[in-house]
Image: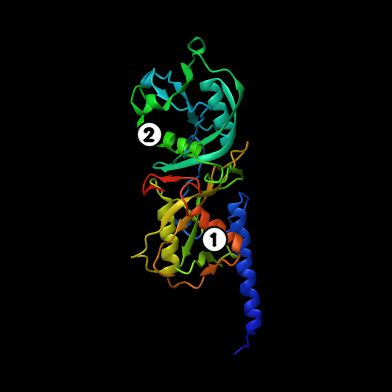
Amino acid sequence: MAYVDPKENDTNQRETNSHAEEDLQKILNGQHVPVDYITVGLDRIGNFVPKTKKTVYYIVGAILINDAGQILMIQEAKYSCYGQWYLPMGRVEREESFLEAVKREVEEEAGLTFEPTTLLCVEYGSGYYYRLTFTGHVTGGKLKTLEQKDKESLQAEWIDPVHIQNKLLPIRAKDILSLIQIGYKYWERTSEQRHRPWLPLPNKHKHIINRPLIVQKNSNSEIYVLTSSEGGVHFPCGVDFSRTPSALLTAFFILKEALGNTKNLRPRICGLVNLEYGGEPGSKEDGICFSILVSLDAPALPQIENSVFKWTQLTDPTLVENICLLFKEGKAVPFIDLHAGKS
C-alpha cells in the first residue's frame, strides 16, 4: 500500500478550504465565480433551452420612493385593467439586460429616468417566471401626465402609502403589495441595517441554475459550507427541470446526493446573495444563475455519505462574520420562492 504523507494531506486540505473560502467571498462581494459543473438536474431538462419571452419570462419592476415618502406608481392603459394603478413594470426583451429593461420601463410608463442602485427582491414562480424588483435614484425626466397618455400608461404619480393602505386607490393586482412593503422596509432602514447594495452581474449561462450555498452553523458558532470535488472544488449547483421550479427543491436534491437521507432536514432560504444574467445580442440561450444562501438549521452537522461532497469549515473570521450577518433580517435580498413560501 502506498504511503501517504499526512503533512501533504494537511496541505491539500488547507488549499481546498482556502479555494472554497475565496470563491464564497467573491460571490458575497458580487463577483463572478464560474459554474463549471452541474450536480443535479441536467439529466431531466431534455431539450429545454431558456429563451426570453419564449420559454422563460423575466419581468422587471421598480420601487422608487421620494423624500416625502411617496411611491412612484403608474395608471394602466391596458384594456383589461384600464385606469387601475400599478408599479412601473414590464417584460424584459430579447437581447436586453435587466438594468436596461427596468430603466426603459420606468421611462416609458412614468416619464422619469432613474439609476438603479440595488436589487430589492426576486420572485420565482411557475412556468419559468421570474420577477426582479429594483430601487434607485431618479435622475431626470418629467412625471407623465394625462396629456401624454399612450399605450404604455395613462399617467404617473407619487402616491402617499396611506392611500394604498386604506384601499383608496384602485390597484390592478394585490401581488405588488408585498413588494411595496419590502420597498418601504428598505427605505426606512439605515445603511447599516440594509443589505449590501448590488446589481445583477452580466454573464451568460446556458441553463437556469440554482447555486444554493448550503451552510450549517453549529452551537459553538462554527460555520460549515457544503462543497463538492466533482469537476473541481465548487459549491454544488442544480438546473431547474420542472415547470414548477423551486430553489429549495434544488437544495434538497443536492443534500440527498450528499447525505442520502434528508428526512429530518428543514433547510431555510435566507436570501439571494448574487445573480448573473447575460441578455447580450446574439445569445443563443438566456439562462440565469441564482446564488442563494441556504441555512441547514440542523441540530448537528449531518454525516456525509457521498465522498464527492464534504463539509468545509470556514476559518476566515471576516467571512464567518459576513455569513452571520446574512442570517439577520434585511441583510440579504429577499428571495420569494412561490412554491416554498417567502424567504
Quadrant of residue 313 within the rendered picture: bottom right
What residue would you read off at disc 1?
235
What residue would you read off at disc 2?
175
Q: Is residue 114 visible?
A: yes
Please tell me which residue lies in front, 63 or 240.
63
Q: Is residue 294 above or below residue 161?
A: below
The three-letter amino acid code for the residue at tag 2 is Asp
The three-letter amino acid code for the residue at tag 1 is Phe
Where residue 331 appears, x then y in whole percent?
Answer: 51, 48
Calculate the distance from the C-alpha at mark 1 to the C-alpha at mark 2. 33 Å
The residue positioned 60% from the left and 45% from the top of the image is 204
Q: Is residue 328 above or below residue 50?
A: below
Please tell me which residue lies in front, 85 or 90.
85
Please tell me which residue lies in front, 134 or 291.
134
The residue positioned 56% from the left and 23% from the top of the image is 107
Q: Is residue 37 above or below residue 272?
A: below
Where residue 56 appears, x then y in whole percent?
Answer: 47, 39
